[in-house]
Image (tube, helix red, strand yellow):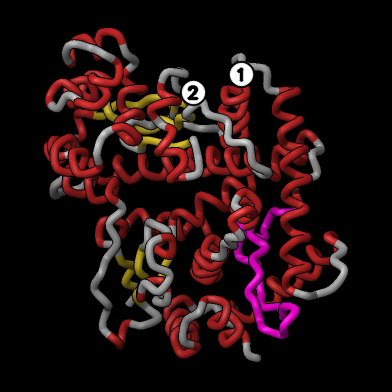
Amino acid sequence: MKAYEKIAKILRTDRDVIKSVEEKMVAIVGHNNVLEKIAAENEKKMALALNALDVPSYCANDIFRALLGKIKKDDEKLTNFIEGNFSKGGNYFEKLLNFAKEASGCPTGKFLKIKKARELIETNPPPKIIDFLGYKNVAELLEKEDIFEIFAALRFMEDGEWLNKVFFKPYEKLTPDDFETREIKGKVLHDKWARAAEKFIKKKYHNLSHLKELGIIFIIPIKIERPGETMRTVTLALHYCHEVKFYSDLFEKFAKEEGDFSLKFVSALRGDVQDTRPPEEKLGSDWLIVQRYLAKDDEYDWRLFYPHVNPEALHWERAERDIATLSDKFELGLDFWQGLGFVGDFYKDESGVEVLVSFNLIDNAMALFMDKELIKYLYHHQEALWNKIFTGFFGEEQMEEIIIKNFDKGIISLS
């Protein structure tokens, strides 16, 4: 099987799509054999990983269970390390955030001024939060509560319709002057929010989230007792550090450009993705910018099968590198996962049916966490592979520059 056919099969797209990508990108950039190199690297990394896992057979289920077993052991190592070494702050959640901040560097960025954030709350007082806390009015809320905690609570207490139609409406009038430079903030919410967030956590299956506009990563203080929880939470926190910084860079770019800053800002926060298919003759030279994991909503969304780059996958890759760097520094033995983000292939199961197995750290951490529900994950691996193809021609650093340059258009037109 030729390289472009193998890659197309893994990505669930037509082989002519990948062949067109190869032909157009070679003509534009000049590099050749990129797909062959990716396929060869995939084979080599799988062989090394399988050897390290010492699987009893190359049966898809045996490989999958071995990967989950590896995640479980690494999760235990990471948990013991964090609890034993990251003593800044008192509790487990603070240690997780401190570990993530140190591992990623969590730099500064451009975020909404505190004064402006308070004005937004004053303009549209959050009714459910005020009622839950038993305050008389918004003035009492702002006097007694931390503004970061109020904004965090909006996400899991107020109705989505109210947020989108009422609270976020003034965002459309924000200007670059409403932003300031400060550090990305990690925050463990007060225990009182735990009860209010129970439904949110049951739905989302995680107690960690972030606010791009405020530059905050927050944890709801409810410990989820499942295998792999530490690895999943730490990698997600690392991912958020890189994602928040990425969007801060975007906001700075929007501020320097002509045109409506607020429209671009709000579109980025919403996670808008272009829904118009480019002309057929552009196939292979036009790449969509898909800033969400569309497969979570619809695994057959046409944009998943069209050439695209995904900033989310870039943030996850950097989170994996952070884990590997800390692993080397403290000899944790977690470097097994480095560079496996795009790696995976088809293996036969007990019935002889070919099954796609992802070697991606995040896919496997999520699968271990959801093992009781028998849910497997593949989309982090597949999105990482699309990015790998693009970086094969341009390199990672230039890819990010190209994404940021074209972000508000939603598409990269190379010809």
Q: Is residue 206 left or right of residue 54?
A: left
| Residue 197 position in % (x across, y down) | 41, 31
Q: Is residue 61 left or right of residue 271?
A: right
Label 1: which residue?
91
Query: Against 41, is 106 above or below?
Result: above
| Residue 38 position in % (x across, y down) | 63, 74
Find out whether residue 356 is within the magenta segment.
yes
Task: Please report the residue visible at 72 percent of the width from the left and 83 percent of the height from the top.
Answer: 351
| Residue 55 position in % (x across, y down) | 85, 66
Q: Is residue 44 left or right of residue 160?
A: right
Label 2: which residue?
188
Q: Identity of the amino acid at label 1?
A: Asn
Proximity of marks 1 and 2: CB atoms separated by less than 8 Å: yes
SS assignment at label 1: loop
SS assignment at label 2: strand
Q: Identity of the amino acid at label 2?
A: Val
* Boundaries of the magenta span: 336-363
Task: Please report the residue visible at 80 percent of the width from the left and 70 percent of the height from the top.
Answer: 47
* Res. 37 in view: no
Which quadrant of the structure image shows residue 233?
Answer: top right
Which quadrant of the structure image shows residue 179?
Answer: top left
Q: Is residue 236 left or right of residue 78?
A: left
Image quadrant for the C terminus? Answer: bottom left
Task: Please report the residue visible at 60 percent of the width from the left and 65 percent of the height from the top.
Answer: 342
Label 1: few (<14), some (14–19) or many (≥20) C-alpha neighbours in 10 Å: few
Query: Against 62, is 240 above or below?
Result: above
N-terminal-most mark, 1 or 2 = 1
